[in-house]
Image (spheres, rainbow, N blue to C red):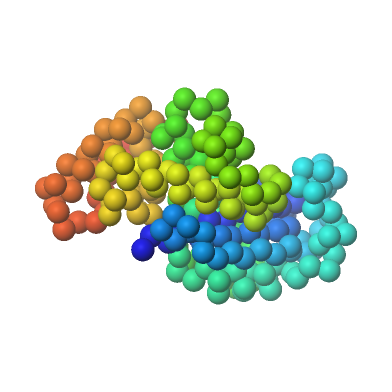
Amino acid sequence: MKTFAVIDFETTGLSPDMGDRATEVGVVILSDGQIVDSYQSLINPGRAIPAFVQELTGISNGMVRNAPDGATVMQALHAFVGDIPFIAHNASFDAKFLDAEYARAGLRRRTEFACSLLLARRMYPDMPNHKLGTLVRYLSLPVTGAYHRALADAEMTAHLLARMLTDLEQQMDAELVCHATLNQLQRVPKKTFADAIARIMEEKENNPKQTSIPIHEEKTNA
């Protein structure tokens, strides 16, 4: 069974290092290509949400005034996700906020992130861009709600991930299409992505008992 926790945060700004906080989190559990569970909560960030962020997300100061605080939500999130590995679209953003909110709650992340944005850049290089909305539209994926709301974005990212897993399984042994392989593939240079898959398959033929193949990483721009 291939199970992933697809997560999305809405926040007061771009960086927890600048004092920004989470205002909403949404997580869906994708198992064997199907969404099987979900968790969503608004979060009281303990600070005002800037007007332009309220306009972007639709989350107002009034909406979060009586929401649980970050520590309460993170405790629930930590219990909900357990040891399931994370996926996010632009994962560096969500990982920063998850780690910052977890730290405030005295928690630590148990698993690594893989990034559907980095993977999409390598798998679908001919897209006009690799924003979630663009990928959903061009790949004819379900639109599950308003963009920039955490649960809707997490659900649409999960549908994108399911499509990417299917496409990868058509190029390589299905058993190799796991979180560790996604994490490795997102780091290879875009122009050598096909070669990386070929190397994985060659290593698998040479070492048939292996289920995760290390890939030589080269420095590359994301």
Q: Quadrant of residue 112?
A: bottom left
List the single residue furthest toward the left.
206
Q: From the viewer's perspective, is residue 44 above or below residue 53?
A: below
Counting from the top left corner in percent of width and height, residue 164 is at 43, 43
Quarter of the figure with the N terminus: bottom left
Counting from the top left corner in percent of width and height, residue 157 is at 55, 48
Task: Give me the residue at 13% from left, 52% from top.
Answer: 207
Q: From the viewer's perspective, is residue 167 above or below residue 103?
A: above
Q: Can residue 66 be seen?
A: yes
- The number of numbered discs placed on residues in the rendered structure image is 0
Task: Give me the residue at 51% from left, 27% from top.
Answer: 127
Counting from the top left corner in percent of width and height, residue 212 is at 26, 54
On the rendered structure, is 212 left or right of 140? left
Residue 153 or 122: which is nearer the viewer?
153
Task: Give me the residue at 50% from left, 45% from top.
Answer: 160
Q: Can residue 99 be seen?
A: no
Q: From the viewer's perspective, is residue 67 above or below residue 130?
A: below
Residue 163 or 21: which is nearer the viewer?
163
Residue 204 or 22: which is nearer the viewer?
204
On the rendered structure, is 196 left or right of 83? left
Counting from the top left corner in percent of width and height, residue 52 is at 82, 42
Task: Give me the residue at 81% from left, 62% from top.
Answer: 64
